[in-house]
């Protein structure tokens, strides 16, 4: 299953400039999700973050991984209707290489542990085949 931007916006409440996922190219609930983030020189954060040597802020790479994890959690828990999915924790965050304009982040999400209202996921971000970041992220869900 694939998701475009409209379907992504139905699941997570983020909008410009905080929506960090452009497309989900594969969802296998309770197994794996793969999402894409196209990194453009026109992104607002490049104006002030290392303006002479443009590098995507690590915190925004983690945010993109978290948003992909949120979508994975939504489908893995088979959530319906209005839900808010919150960060619960992020641990073992590691960065291995910079992400620059023109790169495409490929984000992979897999399960560590899923409980009724909580989930812990392993996220990895790649540029091409090169691992650029990874993190373990926890989520909780609240019906609204």
Image: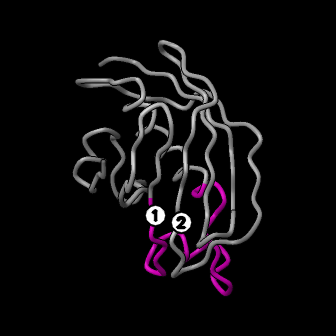
Considering the numbered disc 1 on the image, is that residue within a helix, a strand or a loop?
Answer: strand
Task: Give the residue displayed 39% in from the left and 44% down from the top.
Answer: 27
Residue furthest to the top in view is 116
Residue 55 in magenta stretch: yes
Q: Residue 36 location, x and y as percent?
A: 44, 61
Determine the CA span between mark 1 and mark 2. 5 Å
Q: Residue 69 location, x and y as percent?
A: 50, 40
Tag of residue 24: none
Q: Of residues 15 and 65, which is closer to you in this image?
A: 65
Q: Of residues 81 and 35, which is closer to you in this image?
A: 35
Task: Give the residue displayed 55% in from the left and 24% down from the top.
Answer: 119
Q: Of residues 17 and 109, which is closer to you in this image?
A: 109
Question: Does residue 52 appear left or right of residue 67 in this picture?
Answer: right
Colour mode? one colour
Q: Quadrant of the C terminus?
A: top left
Are the residues at dot 1 and dot 2 in contact (C-beta closer than 8 Å)?
yes
Q: Which residue is mark 1?
A: 37
Q: Residue 115 location, x and y as percent?
A: 54, 15
Considering the numbered disc 2 on the image, is that residue within a helix, a strand or a loop?
Answer: strand
Q: Give the crowd class for mark 2: few <14, some 14-19, many >=20 residues within 10 Å.
A: many
- Is tag 1's residue or tag 2's residue first in the polypeptide sequence? 1
Magenta residues (range): 36-61
Task: Give the residue displayed 33% in from the left and 17% down from the top.
Answer: 143
The quarter holding residue 48 reads bottom right
Q: Residue 64 location, x and y as percent?
A: 51, 53
Q: Which residue is mark 2?
A: 105
Above or below, 37 relative to 69 = below
Residue 67 in magenta stretch: no
């Amino acid at each position: 299953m694939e998701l475009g931007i409209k379907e992504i916006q139905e699941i997570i409440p983020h909008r410009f400039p905080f929506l960090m996922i452009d497309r989900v190219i594969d969802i296998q609930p309770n197994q794996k999700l793969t999402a894409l983030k196209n990194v453009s020189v026109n992104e607002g954060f490049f104006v002030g973050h290392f303006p002479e040597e443009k590098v995507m802020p690590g915190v925004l790479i983690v945010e993109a991984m978290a948003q992909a994890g949120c979508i994975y959690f939504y489908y893995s828990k088979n959530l319906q209707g209005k839900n808010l999915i919150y960060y619960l924790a992020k641990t073992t965050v590691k960065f291995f290489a910079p992400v620059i304009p023109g790169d495409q982040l490929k984000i992979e999400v897999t399960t560590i542990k899923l409980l009724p209202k909580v989930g812990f996921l392993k996220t990895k971000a790649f540029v091409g085949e090169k691992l650029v970041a990874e993190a373990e992220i926890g989520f909780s869900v609240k019906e609204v």
